[in-house]
Image (cartoon, helix red, strand yellow):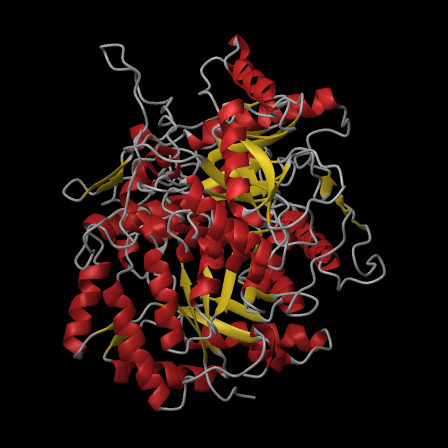
Amino acid sequence: MTASRMMLGWFVNFMPTAWNRPWAGSDPRAWTTGEFYLDMARALERASLDFIMLEDSSVVPESYGKSMKAEFQATTKSPKQDPIALAAAISQVTQHLGIVSTMSTSLYPPDRLAHVLATLDELSDGRVGWNIVTSFEDLAAQNVGLPALWQHDERYVRAEEFVTQAEQLWGGGGSLVSAGGSPIVASGAFGTVSAPQGTLGLVQGDRPLYCQAGGSPTGMDFAAAHADVIVAAPTGVPAMKAYRDGIRERLERAGKDPDSVRVLYMITPVVGETEGDARAKAERLYAPTGDALLRRLVMMSNQTEIDFAEFDLDAPIPADATTNGITSALEAMKKRTAGSSLRAALSEGGQSESLSLIGTPSSIADTMESALEEVGGDGFLLFGGGGGLLSRRYLDEVLDGLVPELQRRGLAQTSYAPGTFRERVVAV
Amino acid sequence: MTPRGPVVGWAVAAETSALLVSEVRALDAARVDLAIVPVTGLGAADPAVVLAAVAPLTSHIGLVAGQSPWQQPPFLAARGLATLDAVSRGRAGWFVQPEVTVSTVTDDSGRWFPSPDDSPEVRAAALADLYAATLALWDSWEPDAIVADVPAGQYVDDEKVHVVDHVGPYYSTRGPLNLPRTPQGRPLVVSAVPTGGTPPVAGDVVVLSTSVAEAPAEVARIRAAAASPDTSGAAAPLVLLAVRPLVDAAADDRTRPYPTLAGSAAQVVADVLALLETSGADGIVVVDVPKGAPTGAVLHGVLPELGAGHGADPRILRTRLGLAPVPSVNTPVPADGTTPVGTPVLEVAP
């Protein structure tokens, strides 16, 4: 079944906005006050978007060139402030917008997470969501007293227990819970949580809305088991459809209604007044030179923990190169650069997005509409490219240019339905 | 320091988050210097989260979040409180409450809770370890680390960001923090002590609960302890007295660890000023005043007469309270031997 309309969210990092490119504004440090992002939340609500999703990570990477220098040029991950404070502030300057905050099951204690999300749920009157992540950086683990993170699949096993414990603290978890201020003890295979003074009930009932981005089979299993909204970036319509079908199969196998979960695809539209405008803009943004090339190298290094500064950009990666990072990623890059070069390999795509959307509001809306028709649903997660890239101009292009075009076609909502965030998502 | 009246703080009792938000806004409008929101348990809203929500709705008041050191590891606490300082443009504080256990989690990684041994000695040692880690994280970015050098394409000078590598008996954290040094250098650190008590950490503000008669000796004792060699280097804390002002209402017979000052507004003003004069304290923290009319009578009948909050700019909390800037420990000492001090990273007009 196709949903009656597309869900729209926006994924954003509490990081520097555009600072060394056009339309950067006058103060490159002003992002730290959060005012830009409060303005953004107001603008998203004016455009009737379903939700804002705040990303989180807690490291200053040193993967590229074995120092922080390149990261502090590309600002892909740092500086970044705590999204919880921003989510709390957004709750006071909006009335309807869903507010999803990312929190890691590997880095937070479950009782702290439960307390924070319960408080956000109350502050927002039932509009909070939890983007459940398990993290992957050892440096982040070392910040909170672990030598390294657990391996991928073990992180998900632990996340299961973590979610169960959080739900017990919210009062929805079953027999361990006593009403009204009695002690709670939630025991699992890995640990025990006890709360002497009971729970904080949620406006949204037994739990907040859950978001999840599961790319791997284990991640998809976890997402299908828990999430209300699943975000993903499979590239191209066939891959988008295969991903959504994979989620729906899992839901059916588990005896759940496949229409109870929404799958959203990541996109970063490049909007112009003419097709030519948009193409020229995309070329300036993505050409693999200068800033954009460094950014891609730093991001690849951060994701794979391979130091790409060691390799000649204009040659293939040597067959005998080794890494302390992810070996499979290095081997894949060797194949991609064989008979070619690292620079050429990096010029092919590299954006985290499902569809390449470069054009006018009308042509982009055409592509989004036909893609979802073919895929079956359910919506899109807008993204502005991450740290150091977002400007008010870009927000305007999408929110005052593209979104109204989607609304005119009846594809996007023009007002908010009543109810909590979770109730509204289920009713899409 | 510009002449100003006594520092006035207000202890805000646990409430629903919507009521906390409106109460702190009312205190801000009345020019109270510090809203102190203690943490009580999972059954009440988390103060740090609520105060982040209040930040864009207020302009001057210090937002002092009660947080037990045992709630989360130092990295997460340091990051959250530093962000509160950024979004409040330099008005964040941490009310350190080691006596509170919100909830506990113990797991096979052993990283969440300092020790199963909760003897006072072990808890004091764990707190000292956690506090050292927290300060090191807050100091991990030098004040001028953000350079935003457009021609060089460099947003942060990586030489001004320092890995912490704190490895203590109870806590370890690699660092650095992933966000810049805060407007205040670090959030204001506040703790509470009873008569004869010792502040749990060498912070910026001590809230003392004692009687009118004992106040002079107790204030002197706190100041002397802060100046003793084993806390060398710490700035002398502001000492504030917990008081319960009641305008036009009779005091009840209940015994409390702090004085009730009851009478007409003029009488309460005179009693507060006399208490500050004889004790030498820097100000008061209003505690246990019922909401509604009794609170209004203090906000509008007593505080204006104390001269509280007058001349209340600048908006960086430490500066407004007359506290010395926080030294940046990672900044090299200048050749002339003077002590480098941290400067606010930014002061953006609202």
Visible in this render: residue B174? no
Query: What percent of the width, then of the height, locates residue B86?
Result: 39, 45
Q: Residue at x 17, y 78 (%)?
A: A273
Q: Is B164 on the left or on the right of A36, as rendered? A: right
- Left or right of A63: which side holds B15? right
Q: Is residue A162 above or below residue A379?
A: above
| Residue found at x 40% / y 56% | B56
Image location (x, y in percent) of residue B277 = 49, 26
Quadrant placement of the N terminus of chain A? bottom right
Q: Residue at x 48, y 74 (%)?
A: A96
**Residue at the farthest right position:** A175
* Left or right of residue A268: residue B234: right
Please state which of residues B307 and A424 is positioned toward the viewer in this rendering. B307
Q: Which residue occupies the foreground of this view, B164 or A160? A: B164
Task: Please count the marks in the image.
Answer: 0
Asked whether the viewer can see residue B155, the reply is: yes
- Is A98 or A275 nearer to us in this picture? A98
Please provide percent x and percent y for residue A355. Answer: 36, 72
In the rendered image, the vertical position of residue A27 relative to residue A325, given as above or below: below
- Image coordinates for residue B22, horizontal then vertical, percent: 51, 60
Observer-nearest residue: A394 or B255?
Answer: B255
**B239 vs B146: above or below:** above
Q: Identify the image quadrant of the C terminus of chain A.
A: bottom right
